[in-house]
Amino acid sequence: MFAQLKGVVDLLRSGIADFRKFRDDSEREKAVFEILKAYFLFKDCVDDGESLVAEAGPDPISKITNMEASLALTTIERWDVIVRRQGMRLYALQDCIFGQHHLSVIDPALQKRISEVIGYKMNRTVTLHGIGATLFFKNMFPVADTHEEKAKYIALMAGEEADTLNMPRIEAEIASLRGALEQYRVIVEKMVTNAELLRLSQRARQETQYAPEA
């Protein structure tokens, strides 16, 4: 997930750099609002994802299997909440990116290129589209998975084909994604005044708080 998200962030960053195409202040403000929503969703994905990967370790299934029963229950329930929340964020990101027309105003071909990256295999069979769809439907239609089955979703979220995690690679992907997000943030801040940024950021943050269905 982290490498795939980084590819999307890079494309968005290249597109929004030319914000001068927005001649109307209201249109520019709408665009900035949606771009800020995407930023918070990206950031929450990497923040929660990094914490979850670090706690689960390279072999989440073995870790949960070797825990005492009560600890395993509370741990897997916490992991499951995070995984389901990630699904909602990925779904919201898709809507944020493709449900608005401001990207087409900036660059008519940008949405097509983003769509290609989302479905691009990144030398793996697991795509961002597949991850998002699986996690979103897991949240919408939760089933009584075993502890081990729930633990498998952590590897899926991280973009792994197997049930184990390549920690050095994932850590490198997370660092790269964070770097891209920082550059993304700097560009967005140049698009508006400080007062506009504060107001729009507060609204965007309020609309990107997600919790899984019970």
Image: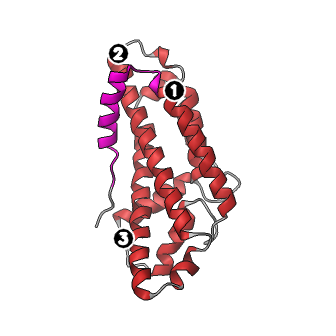
Viewer-nearest of labels 3 and 1?
1
Q: Which residue is mark 1?
A: 187
User: Magenta segment, which residues?
Assistant: 189-210
Q: Is disc 2 in contact with disc 3, using a CB cutoff of under 8 Å?
A: no
User: What SS does tag 2 mark?
Assistant: helix
Residue to which mark 2 is pinned:
25
Q: Residues within 10 Å of mark 1 (few under 14, many from 20)?
A: some
Distance CA(mark 2)–CA(mark 3): 43 Å
Name the residue type under label 1. Answer: Ile
Position in image of residue 61 (x %, y %): 55, 78
Magenta stretch mostly in which secondary structure?
Answer: helix
Mark 3 or 1 closer to N-term? 3
Q: Is 49 above or below relative to 94?
A: below
Q: Residue, x 58% and y 69% (percent of image)?
A: 57
- Which residue is drawn at the image coordinates 58% and 34% (left, top)? 11
Q: Residue at x 63, y 56 (%)?
A: 171
Residue type, numbered disc 2? Asp
- Quadrant where the N terminus is found in the figure: bottom right
Where is residue 152 drawn, in percent x and y?
53, 72
Tell me which amino acid carries mark 3. Answer: Pro
Which residue is under mark 3?
A: 142
Of badges 2 and 3, the one in the foreground is 2
